[in-house]
Amino acid sequence: MGYRVVVAGATGNVGREMLNILAERQFPVDEIVALASRKSLGTECSFGDKTLKTKDLDTFDFTGWDIALFAIGSDATKKYAPKAAKSGCIVIDNSSLYRYDPEIPLVVPEVNPEAVEQVHNKNIIANPNCSTAQMVVALKPLHDRAKIKRVVVSTYQSVSGAGKEGMDELWNQTKGMYVPGQEVDPSKFQRQIAFNVIPQIDVFMEDGSTKEEWKMVVETKKIVDPKIKVTATCVRVPVFVGHSESINIEFEDFLDEEEARDILREAPGILVVDKREPGGYTTPIECVGDYATFISRIRQDPTIENGLNLWCVSDNLRKGAALNAVQIAETLGNRVLKKA
């Protein structure tokens, strides 16, 4: 049995990746439609060996469609997701709008696949923040073994997390560094991003953290375990695609680094690349286009009783967004829709 699938926001970075991944993973599609705003109406998008022309999101009737993958931002989602859900189409939303609604499941299929069974509360499932998604894939199998008490994470997030505008700004600023008179002032980011790092992603909150950091705290608790303490520092770096994270974990019980390495090797969605030699680890360039969350630099933290450090890298447009959404759709098909 195949499904009638909608991809809303099909002309953006994440929307195009959703179409690519649906085709790559041979998701059972009977019919598919690409939706975009009116200004992008008629834009062509690839779906496997087919070419789709975008239709108007504003006038689209979701009645009779099974699953809608949304990559249109919170404002548009607020308008169109309830409309789709009311018509009986299940929405998998990539924006932050519904992530913190207690009635809406927030799902990473390797971590909490059972949560999709709550979908009928509102016919909407939320996709987590890109930096959270890859981290919880690494945390869950370790948490199952030794119970995580506290996580300290520093992120090194690529400009694609800020969309096409972020990628363009890095490209144009980099070119401008070498051509006198063509320097590009910051527009999308708060400071120059070329040859620089920026310790701010999203807006500042009252306690001095940024909203991106707050998201990692709240989402980890919702997806993995509300008892886990998380503190995060999120940094934008001059990398086009691929988020990296330095993660320090404190457990209730001792976990040897060798056992941790073995656990992660067997865990779904993870590829361990961890050799103690020059280059024996994964960097963002190697993870682009891959489905896996890569784990390297696994080692004991001698400064705390039950501590480990590790390095975590993933393609943020894939596992951090489009891939996770498609995996949610696959999980829906296996656990919910086939029961109907």
Image (cartoon, rainbow, N blue to C red):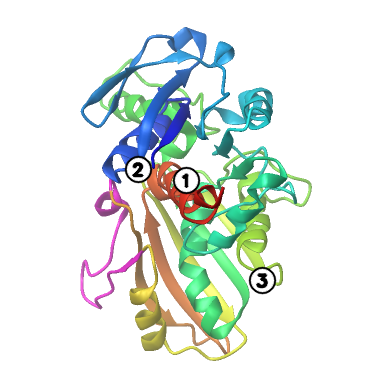
Residue at which label 1 appears:
329
Q: Around disc 1, counting alpha carbons within 10 Å, would you say few (fewer than 14), some (14 to 19), or many (20 or more)?
A: many
- Image location (x, y in percent) of residue 171: 33, 28
Crowd band around label 2 with a 10 angstrom C-alpha radius: few (<14), some (14–19), many (20+): some
The secondary structure type at the circle numbered 1 is helix
What is the residue that sits farthest to the right in this orientation?
A: 206
* Residue type of the residue flagged with mark 2: Phe
Q: CA distance from mark 1 to mark 3?
A: 28 Å
Q: Is residue 51 magenta?
A: no
Residue 340: % across, % down = 57, 47
Query: Which residue is at the front of the view, 313 or 123?
Result: 123
State whether residue 293 appears in this view. Answer: yes
Q: Residue at x 57, y 86 (%)?
A: 304
Q: Earlier in the sequence, mark 2 or mark 3?
A: 2
Residue at image mark 2: 27
| Cα gap from disc 2 to disc 3, whole angstroms | 34 Å
Question: Which residue shows up at 35% across the image and 41% down it?
Answer: 28
Kind of residue at disc 1:
Ala
Marker disc for residue 228? 3
Q: Are marks 1 and 2 in contact (CB under 8 Å)?
A: yes
Residue 241: which quarter of the image? top left
Q: Is residue 40 left or right of residue 339?
A: left
Asked whether, in this view, residue 41 is left or right of residue 72, the answer is: left
**Is residue 240 among the parts visible in the rendering?**
no
